[in-house]
Image (tube, helix red, strand yellow):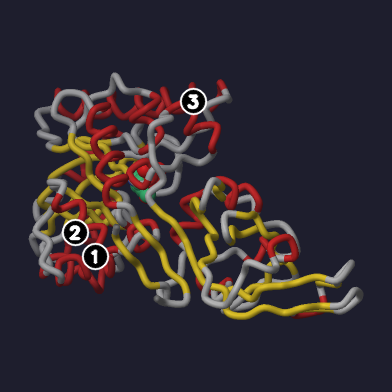
Amino acid sequence: MVRAWVECSKADLGHNLKLIQGKLQGGCEVMAAIKANGYGCGLIETANMLNKLDVHAFCVACLKEAIELRKEGFKQDILIMGYTPIEQIKDVIHYDLIQTVVDLSYAQLLNSLKLKIKVHIKIDTGMHRLGERAEDLEGIKKIYECSYLQILGIYSHICANDLNKKRDNEYAQHQLQLFDEAILALVSDGIDVKKAHIQSSYSIFQFPECHYDYARVGAALYGVLATKKDAKELAPSLRPVLTLKSLVAGIHHLEKGELAGYDLQYEAKEKSVLATCSIGYVDGVPRALSCGKGSVLIHGIKCPIVGRICMDQLLVDISEIKDEVKSSDEVVLIGKQGDNEISIYDVAEACDSIPVEIMGRLGSRLDRFYI
Ligand SMILES: *Cc1c(COP(=O)(O)O)cnc(C)c1O
């Protein structure tokens, strides 16, 4: 037993992967997004599970994540989706990684190193975060003229996912159209664009008719979309993979009017019993869940978080079940216990966030188990 931990369900990850693969058309493969410590599930172990499930391509945010995977011996193609400073490019080559070309000037800088570098070209279809503009075909063609670059693919990213907004839907369709048009123009110019990809979690369900070479999937693989409502509408069979647990560290009996926690944010309105749980905001429990905004499950009963969440611990009101609870009892912060559940969506909504932010911020000192 440990003080606080994440449990990841291998079966649910496998289930989600199958479901996603079933949506992909004509040879499109999953490129699994395992950035941010595998969305909280653990980088290496998640890669291990996906490797066993025969996933051939990974994408990560940064060089550091990619190197960690190579050092563990993973042979998959690994795409670095973010910016890598030019001084670190020798590691991209040394570890046989694929770097994203974020725009023409970056391509030219890479080319000036006169080193053979594997890349995918990023095309900006409207997010305006990374990429050479899809409309700027001359700029894109100049990237293909960079003779030291080993260009293995071209991709873009859809940024409008709100299902219930017509504006978002039209924007996403427009992004797809810009991407397709750019590719057509390049191909008709005799350029072999190799692997093309634009879909991620939402668009594989929203636009299942698309067929590209990869779908870069993160959230859906781990069983979540941005909201419970979206998941219900688009992909009701997804299964959230991750559970977050800790233990009862101690029990405190308070008289009416006594105060508890940092900054005296809790005052007992009547005789109350509090339990200390061995997990805090550094472990990834959002501090915004303090003072009743969030709750935990103990013995299958929802107990409100009281007072300010601390760095390593938090207090909950167990007055309702005070006679049953003892030190070392299991506390569920995300997931099921008994007949009750606190879903990742409940947690995200309570602190104005989304599931993948909560998952990605789960602390490195949590233990992780794969069941
Ligand atoms: C994180 C990321 C993805 C995966 O997105 P999900 O919504 O988690 O599926 C795909 N592409 C890019 C560029 C990303 O940054």
Binning the other alpha carbons within 10 Å of mark 2 as few (below 14), some (14 to 19) or many (20 upward) gives: some
Q: Amino acid at mark 3?
A: Glu
Binning the other alpha carbons within 10 Å of mark 3 as few (below 14), some (14 to 19) or many (20 upward) gives: few
Residue at 51% from the left image edge and 55% from the top image edge: 334
Residue 242 lies, in percent from the top left, at 41, 54
Res. 110 image quadrant = bottom left
Say which residue label 2 marks. 48
Screen quadrant of the N terminus: bottom left
CB of residue at label 2: within 8 Å of ligand 1? Answer: no
- 3 or 1: tag closer to the N-terminus: 1
Binning the other alpha carbons within 10 Å of mark 1 as few (below 14), some (14 to 19) or many (20 upward) gives: some
- Is residue 336 visible from the viewing direction of this image? yes
Q: Is residue 43 above or below residue 118?
A: below
SS for callout 3: helix
- 3 or 2: tag closer to the N-terminus: 2
Pick the residue in front: 260 or 359: 260
Screen quadrant of the C terminus: bottom left
Seen as rendered, the residue at the extreme right is 257
Pick the residue in front: 4 or 275: 275
Question: Distance of mark 3 from mark 1, alpha carbons?
Answer: 32 Å
Residue 56 lies, in percent from the top left, at 13, 47
Say which residue label 1 marks. 44
* Residue 165 disc label: none
* Residue 233 disc label: 3
CB of residue at label 1: within 8 Å of ligand 1? Answer: no
Q: Amino acid at mark 2?
A: Asn
Q: Is residue 302 above or below residue 268?
A: above
Res. 236 image quadrant = top left
Residue at 28% from the left image edge and 32% from the top image edge: 19
Tell me whether the residue at label 1 lies in contact with that at label 2, contact meaning CB atoms closer than 8 angstroms: yes
